[in-house]
Image (cartoon, rainbow, N blue to C red):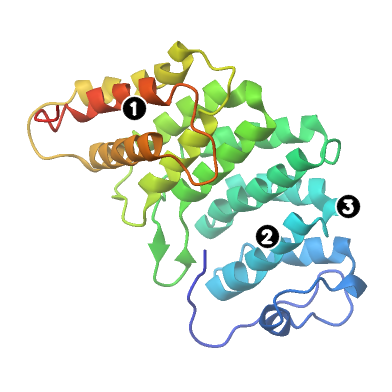
Amino acid sequence: MTAAGAGATTVAPSPGGGPALDWKSLAADGFPFPERAGAPRLAAELSAMLVSPDPVIRDDLAYAAAARWIDAGSLDEVLTELGDTAATRFDHPEVQARTFAPLILCRVVTRGAAVPGLVPAGAVERWYARFAAWYPAERDTRGWDDSLGWLHAVAHGADAAAAFAQALPARRRELLHLCARRVTEARTPYRYHQLEDARVARAVTRILRDPGLTPAEATGWLDVVAAPLEAGGPGPVPVWAFNTFATLQSLHLHLTRGITGEAAPPHAEAVADRVADLLRLPCHWLS
């Protein structure tokens, strides 16, 4: 993801002291890891930049650098601290701080799952609890803001949900229900414009890959989706229902076509059939 920004970009002085890093030069060079700065200082500086309302600072610089360095293992010594800081942001008063927290957690949790013992299991459970309380309840679900850039609470949260499913397989059923509650949230005024439905569908498809899910568990979470849809009546389609149907269509496509380079979920056909049943509510002509 890349955010577009205009005008001058300023970065606050390093919270760790010493000369400020030249972030624009780092970006221009492809973000080589600045060894001399040290991981603790970099983690503090990145965390401060990730709440910035300037999309260039937050997205093009801080997130792009953090993603590269976390994936490469350059920040392993401060990985738990990065996760702890991100998890506290779910209660932040500014929307961009809340919606970039799941992006960082996605990277941190994925890196931790790839290197056993790197992140304490208790830390991942702690982050999951905060994420699970935030994701279905976030009210500002805009994908893009002309001033703040990418916000994408729904899409970023979906990415984090898939990462938590990998790290905490026992939470997969809960995560499916969490995604169902997010897309059917009736209080949102925002209609999916920025492919949020596809990001949720990709996450759900990945969560469903758990070989331990029974057929009933793989399809049962769709009861959460079905209940409000079946209770609907005639009239214009409300925003939440549009979002839900869009996500179901994307999910059906993901289940039947698959994700490149990834195995299909064990119960993909059964889930796709249940999804098709729900899509017949507005589209009764489907065979």
Q: Which residue is mark 3?
A: 77
* Front: mark 1 or 3: 1
Q: CA distance from mark 3 to mark 2?
A: 15 Å
Task: Identify residue for label 1.
Answer: 272
Residue drawn at (54%, 57%), measured in percent from left and top?
94
Left/right placement of residue 242 relative to residue 74 reads left
- Position of residue 232 relative to residue 149, above or below, is above
Q: Residue at x 9, y 30 (%)?
A: 285
Crowding at dot 3, Cα within 10 Å, few <14 / some 14-19 / many 20+, comes out as some
Question: What amino acid is found at the position of numbered circle 1 in the picture?
Answer: Ala
Secondary element type, mark 2: helix
- Above or below, 94 relative to 221: below
Q: Amino acid at mark 2?
A: Ala
Task: Depth check: give the residue in front, 179 or 74.
Answer: 74
Crowdedness of circle 2 by 10 Å Cα count: few (<14), some, many (20+)?
some
The picture places residue 207, in percent across and down from the top left corner, at 53, 31
Residue assigned mark 2:
67
Give the mark nearer the N terminus: 3 vs 2: 2
Q: Where is residue 50 drawn, in percent x and y?
A: 64, 63
At x 83%, y 60%, the residue is: 74
Which class describes the residues within 10 Å of circle 1: few (<14), some (14-19), or many (20+)?
A: many
